[in-house]
Amino acid sequence: MCVDMKTRALLVVVTGSLLLRWVSPVAAYPPDPDNAALVYYQALLLCEQVDDEVREVLSDFARGELEANAEIRECVGRFQAAIEYATVAARMQHCNWGLRFSQGFSMQLPYLAPMRFLHWVVLSDARLQAADGDYRTAFARCLDVRRMGQHVGDDTLISMLVAVALDRSANARIRDLLADSGADVATLQWLKNEMADMSGKLPSARRPMGYEREIAMGIMRPEKLDLLVQVFEGSGTELTEEQIAMADEDFLARNREYYSKFLTSLQTALGAPGSYEQRYQKLTELTDQMTKAADEAAAATLTALFAPGLGKIYSHQVLAEANANATQAAVDIFIIRAETGRFPQALPAGLPKDPFSGQDFAYERTGKGFVLRCPGRDLQKDMVHEYAFAVK
């Protein structure tokens, strides 16, 4: 009987130990993924099968073109799980989309269009949070969209353009909320600090150009001629029968050499010190020289087809920076208003600058708020950008 009691006691101890290990948070299940892309993909799946009407309503609402109502609240409510997954992913450090670069120009980027819709969903939730008076969460949603843009990244030129579009959209919504809100000093100071941490992290055209160069040069070869023809099918810049007939090893070798030198020149221009105007003019000059060479020399034929409009892409990049800097500057101005009850008479010193000129934004008070104006001109659009804030 004594032995039996000892055995039973031992069994209880062993069983209890096993149960504790089974319910332990550490041993119970694997850790959550540390790759943001895996979490984004789940968020995108939660947004599938959305009709065009819903897409249009949420994008219009996020931009402030519609007012909050019961229908919109119900619509955004359907995507709460997707919003949760998106915001968790946005705050993760590592993001690898699993792109198959070996596929070259056939590589698929299936997440780009869904990410655009997902960003409207998150920004719609930001507007609802603001409508309910929770400006801290509303601003946080906008910052998460900026992080989403950083995660979209600059693996390719098209992903880089989507990334800066998301960043510009998020900054526009922050500016809307600043004008609408009565956010307190603590919330605005928090927003300022968060934006300062994100400064200088916008995608650049320089990195994806390196990938595009390797991909393009890889198919400028006789054994890849069919693939080379397919790349341009339906683009409006198809290879002519004459160009296909002359595409022997010598022709393709000379085109590879010219293309490589041209892309290197573009990357050098993008990374060179100097102003926006100097870089833009250099990119335009290089592109004009290439276009002229393509009319006169067969070696530049494929470069004229492959080469992107880098002046335009570079201006998109700089405009995104101008949007971000103007938004940061506006936060400082609204902090002064929250502290003193009025906007400053002059622009405070030390604020982010206009990247088109490298100078401070021009600051002008208006009857209901103020305007920040870029002293420099956007040479691609031939216009000066300005950001108006009218307090409601």
Image: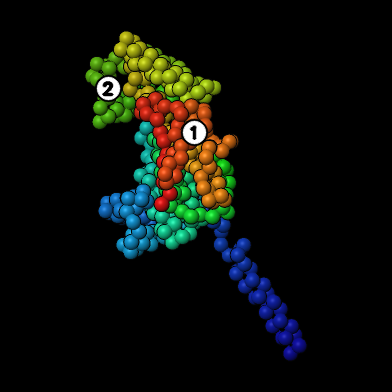
Q: Would you identify the image quadrant in which residue 244 lies?
A: top left
Which tag, 1 or 2, sits closer to the chain's start? Answer: 2
The amino acid sitting under disc 1 is Phe
216 or 122: nearer the eye? 122
275 or 157: nearer the eye? 275
Q: Which residue is mark 2?
A: 239
**Which residue is depicted at the point 38% across and 46% down?**
116
258 or 277: nearer the eye? 277
The amino acid sitting under disc 2 is Leu
As drawn, the label of residue 336 is none
**Which residue is depicted at the point 32% across and 54% down?**
66
- Residue 215 can be seen, yes or no: no
**Which residue is depicted at the point 48% across and 59% down?**
134
Mark 1 and mark 2: span between their CA atoms?
47 Å
Q: Where 102 falls versus 52 (above or below)?
A: above
Count the numbered circles shown: 2
- Asked whether, in this view, residue 154 is left or right of residue 244, the answer is right
- Residue 288 can be seen, yes or no: yes
Q: Which residue is mark 1?
A: 361
Residue 197: where, in percent of width, then height?
57, 43
